[in-house]
Image (spheres, rainbow, N blue to C red):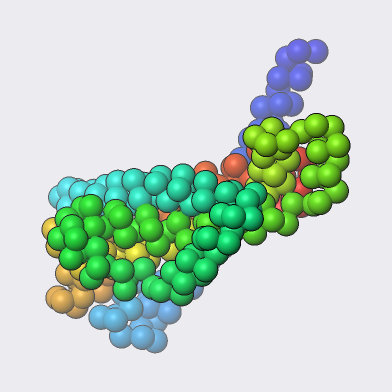
Amino acid sequence: MNGETTTTSRGAKVEFYSRAVLENLLPIAILLGIWEFVSWNEWVPTQLFPRIFTIFITMVEEVTDGVLVTHVSTSIVRLLISVFFALIAGTIVGILMGASRTFEWIFVPVVNFFSVIPGIALFPATILFWGLTEQAVVITISFATSIPIILNTWVGVKTVNETLVHAARSMETKGLALLVRVLLPGSLPVVIAGWRIGIARAWRVLLAGELLASPEMGLGVRIFDAQETLNSAVIYGGIIIIGFLGFAMERLVLRSLEVATVQRWGMMREL
């Protein structure tokens, strides 16, 4: 009996992961297939729209040389450091704004002011203070990334069902306990959405920062250098890598967090 149960459990896991891989990768595979078909038929000049096969061959050559690995790892480290600080600071400030009228009154105008300023516009100011350094890139990315996280966290906390809040208070749940047991779980779907938006923004600001303030290494540097030599295979290769890295972060981290929390709690429909 135990053997049958174990076999059934393994079969269910294999089916689950096979379905997850198929659902996530099939649309991308179809898109790349259409790209290859269009390029192979030369409906667009191959100098501007190279074949997927050519792009991947170029990527393999750069990986073999170690060039691509260095650029990718440099960009990932910058992004992870920046996002780490943005998630912590943005989530804390958003919670304070949602839970306290005083913090809301102070921060809402400031956050709304900066929310309309493109991240790339902040680089000249940070370069004035920190020069062409890693600090300038990380600080700018962190600041720009924290804005949507703050806004979503604030809205999430503010829109938690009032009935739940009143019920918790009627049972003497106040202060930190109210925050941990009611406000945070109730706002988590909106908070995670803010993290998604913030991480996507971090990628955009990262590439601009690598062009303006980090002239040596990074995917942004590699893409813009390839533009100077009209090397379209390297340009599209860099773009594809960014897309896959962002996709992997969203699926493996944020989506997994959603499944383990808000979807498990019945706050989100299963996809």
In the rendered image, the quadrant that contains the N terminus is top right
Q: Which residue corresponds to the image point at 23% horizontal and 57% vertical from the top-left?
A: 136
Q: Tell me residue 250's x, y (percent).
A: 51, 51
Number of numbered labels in the structure image: 0
Asked if residue 36 can be seen in this view, the reply is yes
Asked if residue 251 can be seen in this view, the reply is no
Against 259, is 107 above or below? below
Q: Which residue corresponds to the image point at 52% horizontal and 46% vertical from the top-left?
A: 92
Q: Tell me residue 16's x, y (percent).
A: 66, 40
Q: Which residue corresponds to the image point at 72% horizontal and 46% vertical from the top-left?
A: 186
Q: Tell me residue 248's x, y (percent).
A: 47, 50
Against 142, is 41 above or below? below
Residue positioned most to the front: 102
| Left or right: 12 as drawn, with respect to 194 | right
Q: Which residue corresponds to the image point at 45% horizontal and 48% vertical from the top-left?
A: 89
Against 66, is 39 above or below? below
Front residue (pair 134, 130): 130
Front residue (pair 192, 121): 121
Q: Tell me residue 113's x, y (percent).
A: 46, 72
Front residue (pair 130, 118): 130
- The image quarter in which residue 104 lies: bottom right
Front residue (pair 62, 183): 183
| Left or right: 139 as drawn, with respect to 245 | left
| Left or right: 3 as drawn, with respect to 35 | right
Against 185, is 229 above or below? below
